[in-house]
Structures are given as structure tokens and as C-alpha cells.
Amino acid sequence: MKKVSKAAEANLRELHQIIEEASEGADMAVANFNLAVESYNEALCEVAGEIQCYMDERSDAWLESERGEAYQEWLECFEEEAEETDSPEMDVPGFDSLLMKPEV
């Protein structure tokens, strides 16, 4: 082979164009994903902060009680969720369980 055939060159150009277009869409999808994750993490941290403020207003006896321990676990769920949501493999279905107030 002395040079690439016109058919092969045309095919390669077409496929390269498809890759470039897909890349642009992928870049936008990644940017949108990152923005959504950032917003979600900020909201998780805000709720975790509210839970922490609520707990800070309680007595040491309350914090050591069954209810206090349940709130601590609930707080940790929000904090762990924020740590885990920076990956495309995050477990979105687990979200509903975060909203449930701890049971004692």
C-alpha cells in the first residue's frame, strides 16, 4: 500500500467527525454532571449543617441518648452521601432513605 485509498480516507474523516461531535456532547454532559453533583453536595452539606446545629443545641445527655445516637447516624448518612456523589456510579436510588427522620 503506497497511500490510503480515497474510500478509506473518506470513511476515516467521517468517523473522526462523529468522534469530534460526540466528544463535544460528552464534554457538555460531564460539565452538567459536575454542576449537578456540586449543587447536590452543597444541598447535602446544608442539611447536614442544620442537623448539626439542632444537635449542638441539645444537652450532652440527649446526645448520648438513643435519640441523639439516631440523629448522629442520620447526620453521618448525609456526610457520607456527600463524599460518595462525585462519581458517575453514585447510588441515586438511596436518596429517599436520607430524607427519613431517624426513628427511635
Image: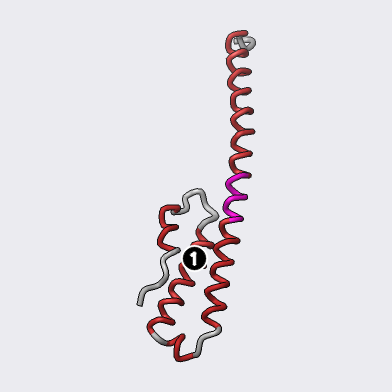
Asked if residue 37 is among those painted magenta in the image, a careful observer would answer: yes
Residue beneath the point at 43% across and 87% down: 64
Q: Relative to 17, is 80 on the left or the right?
A: left
Query: Which of 79/46 is in front?
Result: 46
What colour scheme does the image use? secondary structure
Res 103 → quadrant? bottom left
Q: Position of residue 35 (x, y in %)?
A: 62, 50
Residue beneath the point at 52% across and 56% down: 85
Residue beneath the point at 55% across and 84% down: 57
Q: Is residue 6 above or below residue 66?
A: above
Query: Which of 57/32 is in front?
Result: 57
Q: Position of residue 32 (x, y in %)?
A: 61, 44
Q: Which residue is mark 1?
A: 80
Res 44 → quadrant? bottom right
Q: Is residue 56 above or below residue 34?
A: below
Q: Quadrant of the N terminus?
A: top right
Q: Which residues are magenta?
A: 32-39
Query: Which of 39/4 is in front?
Result: 39
> Which class describes the residues within 10 Å of circle 1: few (<14), some (14-19), or many (20+)?
few
